[in-house]
Every structure is written in C-alpha cells, then in structure tokens.
Image (spheres, rainbow, N blue to C red):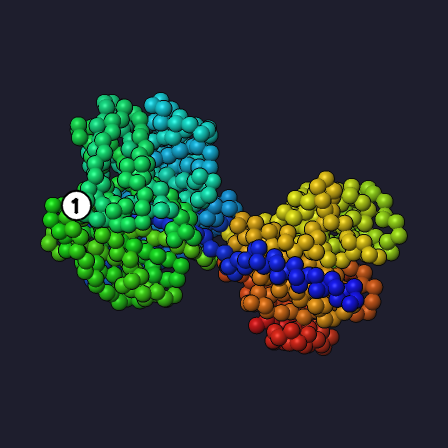
Amino acid sequence: MSRNLTRAASLTLVILLSLVLFPAIRASAAWDGGHDVFGSLEPHETWYFAEGTTRAGFDEWLCLLNPGTAEASATVTYMLASGQTIDKSYGIKAASRLTVDVRADVPAGSDVSARVTSSRPIVAERPIYFRYKGSITGGHDVMGANAPAAVWYFAEGTCRPGFDSYFCIQNPSGGTANVRITYMLGDSSTRQQVLEVPARSRRTVAAADALGVADDAAHDFSAKVESTGGVGIVVERPMYFSYKGAITGGHDVMGAPGPSGDWYFAEGTCRPGFDPYICVQNPGETRADVRITYMRGDATTRSQSLALRPHSRSTVAVASVLGSADDAAHDFSAKVESTGGAGIVVERPMYFAYKSAINGGHDVMGAGAASSRWYFAEGTCRPGFDPYLCIMNPGAKSADVGITYMLADGSARAQSVSVAANSRSTVAVKQFLGEADDAAHDFSAKVETTTGAGIVVERPVYFSYNSTAKGSLSAVGDVNLGGDMVPLLQSCGFNPWAGVADLLGGATLAFANLECAISYRGEPVPGKTFTFRGPPDGLPPMRAAGIDVVSQANNHARDFGGTALTDSLGYLDTYGIGHCGAGSDLASAHAPALLDANGLRVAFLAYNDIGYDGFSGWPAAPGYPGIANAADTRQIAADVAAARAASDLVVVSFHWGTERKYTPDPRQVQLGHYAVDCGADLVLGQHPHVAQGFELYRGKPIAYSLGNFVFSPGSEAGHYTVLARFSLDSRGFGGVTVYPVYISGGRPAVMGGSGGQSLLGQVASLSSALGTPMTVHEGYATVP
C-alpha cells in the first residue's frame, strides 16, 4: 500500500472512531430557555416597559393583543438611553394580535424603554431572546405596567458569582427623576444608591457596582426603587445567570408598586430538573409572619410558616419542603400570605432543565388576588416552542374555565377545562392547537371562569429560539504580505484592496488566509524554498478594506520561527483583526476567534494539513508556538463542540490539498465532511492556489479552495480566483454568491467580460462534478 493510501485509510479509521466519541451536533444553534408571565386582569390603553435593547445578541419583540370588536390604532414611543424618542404607529385588527420587531424600529446598539398607547384597550407583552456575553442564551418576558409609580419593590436579586442583576429604570416624564435604590440584604443589613434618570429616557444600573460580588447572604438582596422628587418611574429587574455552573439563562420581572398581604402563584413544580424558589421580602418596620400554602396537582395541600425581620428577605427552596418526584403531587401552585398584617413582596424564580435538553430559568412577581379573567398577548405553537397555561383555583369549589385563543391569522378557537378546588391544572397548548410554522399557530389568549369564580393564571413557555438576525460572510483565499509581495505592496502604499473593498467591506464579516508571518524579527527556516514575512504596515489597509478575521493555520506561519509567529498574533490584535488556527501554545492555537454578525456569534477555527519535505507543519504544543494540526481529528471534534457551545455558527478553515489541482483530493473531501458531521456550518479551504468547486454537504457549504487573493501567483492559472459571499442567519450559512477575480501585480479586482464569465463557468462545472449545481449569471454565480 502506498504511503498516501495508508494515510487516507488511517484518517478514515480515526474519523469513524471520533464520530463515535463525538456524536454529530445539531446543525443549527438555538437560544434555549424559557419565560413566564402572569396574565393581565384587563386590557388598557397605555402600557410601559422599562427594559429593552437592540444590542448585538438581543432580539426584542412587542406583542399587542386587541381583544375588542373593532380595530385599534397603537403608537409605540421608544425612549432611548440618549434621551432620543422614536414614534411608530400600528393598526391591530379586532380580536387579533400583532407582533412588532423592535430592531426594525430602533437603531442597532440602543438601550430602549417603551410606552404603548392605543385608541382602544389592548394587552401588551415584551419578550426578549438573547445570547448574553456570548455564552448565556435564553429569554425573558414581562407584561407591561399601566402607569408610572413613585415606588417599585423587588423580592429577588443576587450578586453571587454567576449572576448579573440589573435595574432598568424608565422615566417617561418631562422632568429629571431623582432615584434612590434601597438594597435589603440577606444578612439583614441595608445599602443605598442614588442616581438621576433624565426626562423621557432610561437608565440601567448593575447591582454589583453597588454591592460587589461574593458567595454569601450579604450579596442576596431585595430592593425598593423610589423616585424621591415626585416624578413617576417604571422599573424592571432583569437577571442573567449561570446557575450551579450548568444552567444558563435569564429572567426578568416588572416591580411591584407596593407590598401586599397576599400573593398567588399558579405555576411551580418540583419534578426532576426543576428548582423552584419562593423569595419573600419584608420592606416594613416590623416582623412579618408568613404562611405558604402549596396547592398540589393531586388536589392535596401543604403549608409552611416562616418569619422575616424588618427590611430583610428570605428564600425558600420549595423542594426542601415538597421533595422531588415525577408526578402530579410535585406540581404546585402557591398562596403566600402575611398572617400578622405586615405587607410583603413575593417572587418565584425557577431554574430548569426542561425535557433534559432545554435549560434556563424564569421568574414572576406574584399576583395580588385571584380574578375571573386573565389576558395574554404572547404565545406560539411554532416548532421549538412549548407553551403552557397554568391555572390555579384557590377557592373551595371546582372552577369551570374557558380559554379563547385569538390567532395571528385572525381566527379563534375555544377550549374548556375544569380545575378542582384548592388545586391547579396545566394546559399543554400544543395538544389543542397543534404545531406549525405559520401565523395560525401564534396566539394570544383570554382565560376566564364561566361562573365568576376567582382563578390565577400564568403562561410559561419553553423554547429553542432561532434569532431573526441575518448577515453575510465574504471569504477569500491566500493573502501574502511578505516575500516578493513586499515591493508590490510598497508601490501601492500597502493597499492592494481597492478592487475588492466594496465586496469585502459590504459584508457583515470577511475572512482570509494570512499566508505569512507579520514581524521584523526571526530568521528564515533553513532549507525551505519559500519563506514569507511581511511588515505590519500591511495590516491597517487590510482591516480598512473589511477583513475581520484571518486563519494562520498554514505552512508559512512559522517561516521565521516562533518569535515571528507570536509577533504576528500581537500585530493582528493591535489592528483589530481576529485570528485562529495558530497560537503561542496548544490551547491558544485551538481557541476559536469569536465575532459578532448582527447579533449572531460566529466562531472561526482553522487547521493546517500541509507540511514540507516530510515535515508536519509545526503543530502547536504546550509551550511551543505553532498551528492547529488537521491530523488530530479528535481535537477537531472537541474544538467544534466547544465552539458551538459559545456561538451560534461555526466556520472551519483548512489549509489542504494539492497545489494547482482543480479537484479536491479524497482527504479534502473526508476532512470537509467530517467537520460538518462534527457541527461546522461552513468549511473554507485554501492552498491549491487555484479555485476549486463548491459542495453542499448535508446542506452546509464547503469551498474546497478559494485560490489566491493578495498574492504573487507564480503561474498563469494562479491569476484567476474567486471571492465568495455566503448569506448567514441563525440556521447557518445559506446561499453562496461567487464573483470572478483577476490578480494583477498582486492586487485582486473583480473580473468582468467574457474572461469573468469563462472563469465562473469553470467553477460551476467543478461544483457540478461535486454534486452541487451552480447557476451562472452575468458577472457572478450562485449556489443554489
């Protein structure tokens, strides 16, 4: 058996073993989590929301229900942190719902509060889905407040490690609001913070800035947020977390405008995978005696008592009272009451691993009373969403309940359920409405008792949410800023990018393979035919042209030794260019470059499969600067899995193949398919110095060779190359647009005329041979 065949057979065996050890990861990333709200007791003409953002990694929506018999005209006034306001108007059909994409109304990167005013009474909710700080995914949802208030209370809050707690404070008035936050800590001490919120604006307060971070009771808090000068404000408390180091997500509540003697919760469970808590705040001057009555899914009840010192909080881990088991007896609703007349504030956060797959948390402020009717603006039975209606009956008689679903397609459906006395019932909405990806499966709901009895209703939703963010990635092949390119670059002021800058800069992200070291130091490797080292002068023009990230996993990364390689990494960092595939040691060489694409987080990994004269190509090792080695397929699988956990999309680059060969080697195909099987959304190849074909494998694009780009071609064929632009969204990289490029004097430019068409026809033929049709248009080609 030849040496090459032995290597291919060994690779096949390693790939098969690796696929057993690292099973294929789902093809599209999702923001997993859950959220929960209490319904509104009635529609109103005005609604306020303190929290909201169009920062990268956040998708914010406004869900507006018009339960009436005539169309409603609604105006959304967005109040930005800068003090700017934006008005948008919408019509809401009778007995229907409307969903507003806040990102379409508000400039990107804005923190925003909102006021919704309507010509007729409506119901308004605001769900937000997120990837927070790159790695925490989830969503939260609140029902809006109907008016500003002078004081807002919160029972839950913590600055323990792994929790980021915020206060979002909206001032919808025309004057400055002077605000004081009183933190009532778990160790019975208090702290205060004062601030100003300008007129028609919002302010975000990170609680840790006032309290610090530590793992003790002094960093658990309840809070009172008050406007001391008579100006009404609206306050929410979002929180993002890594719970017990395993469950990540976020939840949010609108504050309570005052303490109360009774608080009700319809939802709660101690089934395996769920950790519910009841947080009780006593903001008053006297002790509060509290009784919690659990109304269980098997129609039994259980009670618990506790006492709270003034200005303090207490946290009840419900499973320590009810235990944990997978049965109806461990589903519960709860009534929390102050038995001695002191006013209290109560929340119920819950952390979960739903169906052992979706983890997150949600939280609600309790309801102050039962009611005969509850409204919900948000709800969906689209794929990836599991909505429920949790109905609590705290009364002594059975309650007959009617549910009216008002669907986004204008139709309606009705359902009836019965809830036993002192008990709860859970409605799985999908069992009634079914599941489909259309407007008929988006719903609002009215839940009411047919006899006027009082009930309490929440609507938890568990989800795998796919962001609506979209973007594009331009990708090119080999870029050499050293060797015989240096005099060519000097002649154009180190800016060879003019002929392609529009296509690169016009994309959300742009990628290239940097085929040289960037340094003034080091000596060329003895005996190597070509060694490339360029000055840092070439990097600012490359960044200005739009290149965001480069691979250095190639056979020229260490042409001038380890010092020059580490210099390269430092210069790339200095000029704001991401890099992957090489590092000062093994861990850094395998670390992904993480970049933002309109709110989607994209991870780039790169591997070298090319040596020279039998040398393996300088794989990085502990304490040894080098490249990520494509031969280590188990490490590739581990790298891709880790990158998926920290991002929405994964791009894998390979330096591979045979120079001047137009068709991929079997090893290229094996590695490309393997990367996709491990979870890559896109595979990019370089090194052959000519453009090879494109393949769609399992729906994921593989560009086997993007050819040269900023390069001294070395052959006539090497002058002809391509620039590929890939569309992207949360489900992956979609359509590919390929532009023909000709390199003259080391400078690439889009190629027109018959020559460009001929090159596109050649690439289309090569792609067709790989089983992927490509359509040639005038001046560009597309897949599909």
Q: Nearer the viewer, residue 719 or 634?
A: 634
* Coordinates of residue 505 in the picture (x, y in percent): 63, 57
| x and y, in percent, of residue 725 in the image | 61, 63
For the residue pair 271 and 352, the one nearer the viewer reads as 271
**Measured from the top left, where is residue 347 in percent x and y?**
30, 38
Residue 755's image quarter? bottom right
Residue visible at 14% across and 48% down in the picture? 421
Q: Is residue 341 visible?
A: yes
**Quarter of the N terminus within the rendering:** bottom right
The quarter in which the C terminus is drawn is bottom right
Residue tagged by mark 1?
Answer: 422
For residue 550, above or below residue 210 = below
Foreground residue among 48 and 554: 554
Q: Residue furthest front?
A: 1
Horizontal side of residue 568 vs 39, given as left or right:
right
Q: Residues within 10 Å of mark 1 (few under 14, many from 20)?
A: many
Amino acid marked by disc 1: Asn
Say left or right for 344 vs 662.
Answer: left
Residue 472 found in image quarter: bottom right
Instruction: Say if residue 566 shows up in the picture.
Output: no
Image point 54% across, 59% down: which residue?
Answer: 24
**Identity of the residue drawn at 71% across and 73% down:** 759
Above or below 553: residue 183: above
Residue 698, image x and y in percent?
A: 56, 67
